[in-house]
Every structure is written in structure tokens, then in C-alpha cells.
Amino acid sequence: MRDWLDAWWPYLTFAVAVVEVVAAGHAVLRKREPRAAVAWVVIIVLVPILGLLLYALFGINRISRAGARLRDEMPNYDHVRTARISGSQLQELLEEDTSTSSLG
């Protein structure tokens, strides 16, 4: 066991360092609050493996990802414009509606 660890120690250290840099970059680019990004980078760098696990569990906002995915699946109603009418036009429409509904 000891020989295996001695042989692979530099590669494992390098792999953890690369994953730390990627996670820290992700935190800096994805966090809206600068204080939160700095806090995650500090945790990732000071406590390497545990910090990576904590960031993977609690630092990545999966709810906004799910919301974005659902938003992308919804139909696009950008082509529909909302009608802007004045109060008097609304009153006329309501009066028309009540007069036509009483006929039937």
C-alpha cells in the first residue's frame, strides 16, 4: 500500500490541485455575491478535499439550474403583446360584454 501511495502521490496532488482551480473558477464566475465567491475560494484552497466536497454539495445552485431548464422547455410567448387600453376603453368593453350576454 505504501509503495502505491509513494508512486502516485505527485499525480494525486496534481489532480486535486487542478480540480481545486476549476472549482474556485466556477465559484468566482457563478456566484452573484462577491463575498460568497471569496468565501468559497478560501474554503476550497484551505481545506482541499473537504472544501471541494462542501462546494459540490452546498455551493452549486441546482435550483436555478432546474428553473432554467424548465424555463427553456416552456413555450415562448414573446410574440404575444399585451393590450394596453385606457379606463374608458375598458368600461366600454365591459358594457358591450354585459349587453351582449343579456341577449342570449
Image (spheres, grey):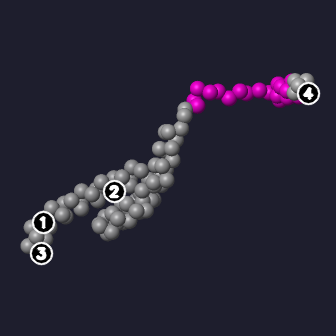
Expressed as whole percent of the image width and height from the top left, the position of residue 32 reads 47, 52
Residue stretch rendered in magenta on the structure: 77-99
Q: Is residue 95 visible?
A: no
Expressed as whole percent of the image width and height from the top left, the position of residue 84 reads 73, 27
Q: Is residue 1 left or right of residue 17?
A: left
Q: Residues within 10 Å of mark 2 (few under 14, many from 20)?
A: many
The quarter of the rendered structure image containing the C terminus is top right
Q: Residues within 10 Å of mark 3 (few under 14, many from 20)?
A: few
Q: Is residue 58 left or right of residue 74?
A: left
Q: CA distance from mark 1 to mark 4?
A: 86 Å
Q: Which residue is mark 2?
A: 24
For residue 22, which quarter of the picture? bottom left
Earlier in the chain: of badge 3 and badge 2, it is 3
Label at residue 8: 1
The kind of secondary structure element at disc 3 is loop
Q: Are marks 1 and 3 in contact (CB under 8 Å)?
A: no
Q: Residues within 10 Å of mark 4 (few under 14, many from 20)?
A: few
Q: Which residue is mark 4?
A: 102
Label at residue 1: 3
Expressed as whole percent of the image width and height from the top left, the position of residue 76 reads 55, 32
Q: Nearer the viewer, mark 3 or mark 2?
A: 3
The kind of secondary structure element at disc 4 is helix
Q: CA distance from mark 1 to mark 3?
A: 11 Å
